[in-house]
Amino acid sequence: MESGSFPPKFWKPGAEAPGASLAEERTVLVDESQSTPYVSNSCAALSLEKQRQRLPVFRHRNHILYLAEAYQTVVIVGETGCGKSTQIPQYLLEAGWAKGNHVIAVSQPRRVAAVTVASRVADERGAILGHEVGYCVRFDDCSDTRNTRIKFVTDGMLVREMMADPLLQRYSVIILDEAHERTLHTDMAIGLLKKIQKRRPELRLIVASATLDAEKFRDFFNHNDTKDCSKDTCAILTVQGRTFPVEIFYSTSAVPDYVVTTVETIMKIHEHEEEGDILAFLTGQDEVEEALKDVKERARMLANQGLKVHMRPLPMYAALPHREQARIFERTPRNCRKVVLATNIAETSITVQGVIYVIDCGFVKLRAYNPHTDIDALLIVPASQASAQQRAGRAGRLRPGKAYRLYTEEQFEKLPRATVPEMQRSNLSPVVLQLKALGIDNPLRFSFIAAPPAQAMVNALELLFALGAIDDDCHLTEPLGMRMAEFPMGPMFAKMLLESGNFGCSEEIATVVAMTQIQNVFLSPTNQKAKAARAKRRFAVEEGDHLTLLNVYEAFMKHKKNSQWCHENFLNYKGLVRAVAVREQLVRLLTRLEVPACSSEGDSDAVLRCIVAGFFSNAAQFHYTGNYRTIREGYELFIHPSSVLYGEKPPKWVLYSELVQSTHHYMRDISAVDVTWLLELAPHYYQQGTERELGAKRAKLLAQ
């Protein structure tokens, strides 16, 4: 197709193929003779063993095993799809690294990648998932202590394992996959593994990255303090990946609504382009579902008009159940085009075979924390140039591909070069809590690969002190602080769960917490919004969202988890099933920690007071201007349109679970509370003090 096929939306800039920049590799090789280029090809009809041998990484097998023997740490740079995630663990297993009851761990930033890659490796080995090959992610452990030799985990679960086994003695090799994503837990794992290596020189670490940031990892892990390169403890290997060029098309003008434009671009590709699957990037589950419905409707219209090639639109996002996620990896039938609408989870964590066309909306949803305002919010921001290149790289695995960027070339040039690591833009209270539980008394002196803002550390210490997790000397309290660190969620949720027995409502609080882990409990189809709103009101209570979620869960259980009942009431059936599983794990953890099982027997105040005990710092007061203000700093907040309190008479005082930022800061998961509860349950947090007194407190925390 010529670039003029989509006038006036897109154009092909420059005389040189823009895809050339994507194909360039700044090769950093220990042995350049090992860098034989390999042309990616479709191998679906071949046996699994033949498919393994056709992956680019296969030509580096012996070299990788040599480096693992010779160096403590090996940094492997390879594009997503080169085979590093699935093959390197198997090479190590075949070379004997899992002998003597040792295990090879593969750590992933995302649960989706951990589960998906584990399933693929189990298939390749002809093994039952959970035996020789297993996985362990939050709220889901599919591994066998005695038999599992390759264990896929999330970075968060790897850090959590260190609480029980500080030196990770079970593992002979740990692979940190997709390390370039630089999540909170990735950076924690990087720093902790560096410490472990000093105590366990025999432990091998392989850091796998899809971007060219290898030097940063090498400098961090190289324990050689001399100028003698022969004493280096870290080596770098680059695995060449895709060789097919990718043509890039930019929008000629700013796009007013990228979700609508994404759908329009999908339809134009389907009607005018050759065969090949489409991958479209959006920012979140809600956008994916909105676009999915629109594409399905338009696909039906085209089918009725007699278009021979059908469309198979599929969603992909983190909260999607595993069975639904697996559908995107199925082979596309003849006379059919697969269309995957995905969040940035499809950027590097997974590889969708058959994609020829990529649509990049140019945005990403990130969590951002401002240490000066102490506000932590989800917001949609422009993606980085590195992300744009990763997205474009999804095309052209089988043949030359095309990437459509829904922004101008000028806008691309203004994008940041890389995404800021989570450690430098997040609320650090979960990090500080876990580090202290792991024996790191002074997190400010911890060996981070990139240091977080000092003010964010101070704020984290202040919050943990207010929650009772640390004492005046910044030491973890016993038993509260240690117990809070055992929960696989933030410290405010942990405090709420641990206090639930004292308020006589542990059963209800376990339900509320499980439900808040689910996205989009209430569904609102585009053509049935009025019906969906009426159904939602049947569950709503004036106290707010938390008790409304409790009502939904109890009704779901009363109707025996019936999917048809969920459909009739516009409820997310798959999400509710997951909430049941999450709640079961929380109840088991509460039982182990000896929190009494008890019910409030309908006393809503007990439940709300318990929520206040954990989330008192997220309180806001109604302001005469019609919005809300945070109590300590007076920042402006609004009720999110998804809340049952939206459009109702505003309560004077509310608590929220999280903030989402667009044009304003919106509170989500909100409950109306009594101000006397705040003063009763958190007087230490809201008591007045002079700026000098507060400054002295911060100085003391910083000095620790």
Image (spheres, rainbow, N blue to C red):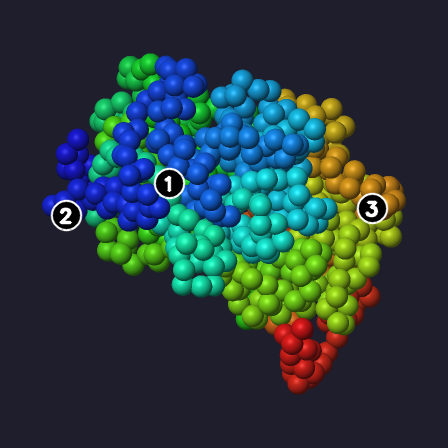
Residue 346 horizontal/vertical position (percent): 43, 37
Query: Tag 2 or tag 3, which sits nearer the N-term?
Result: 2
* Residue occupying image coordinates x 62% and y 44%: 158
Residue 78 - label: 1
Q: Is residue 689 left or right of residue 602?
A: left
* Residue occupying image coordinates x 36% and y 50%: 212
Residue 390 - label: none
Instruction: Single out the mark in the foreground, 3 or 1.
Output: 1
Instruction: Say whether residue 563 is visible.
Output: yes
Please tell me how crowded label 3 is: few (under 14), some (14-19), or many (20+) other residues with Cα within 10 Å. Answer: few
Residue 305 horizontal/vertical position (percent): 29, 17
Question: Spatial distance from mark 3 to mark 1, Cα to Cα?
Answer: 43 Å
Amino acid type, residue under disc 3 in the picture: Leu
* Residue occupying image coordinates x 62% and y 70%: 458
What residue did someone put label 3 on?
Answer: 593
Residue lying furthest left: 15
Residue 1 horizontal/vertical position (percent): 17, 31
Query: Tag 1 or tag 3, which sits nearer the N-term?
Result: 1
Instruction: Single out the mark in the foreground, 2 or 1.
Output: 1
Question: Spatial distance from mark 2 to mark 1, Cα to Cα?
Answer: 27 Å
Amino acid type, residue under disc 1 in the picture: Gly
Q: Is residue 453 left or right of residue 170?
A: left
Q: Nearer the viewer, residue 630 or 684?
A: 684
Query: Tag 1 or tag 2, which sits nearer the N-term?
Result: 2
Question: Spatial distance from mark 3 to mark 2, Cα to Cα?
Answer: 63 Å
Please tell me how crowded label 1 is: few (under 14), some (14-19), or many (20+) other residues with Cα within 10 Å. Answer: many
What residue did someone put label 2 on?
Answer: 14
Q: Secondary structure at mark 3?
A: loop
Amino acid type, residue under disc 2 in the picture: Gly
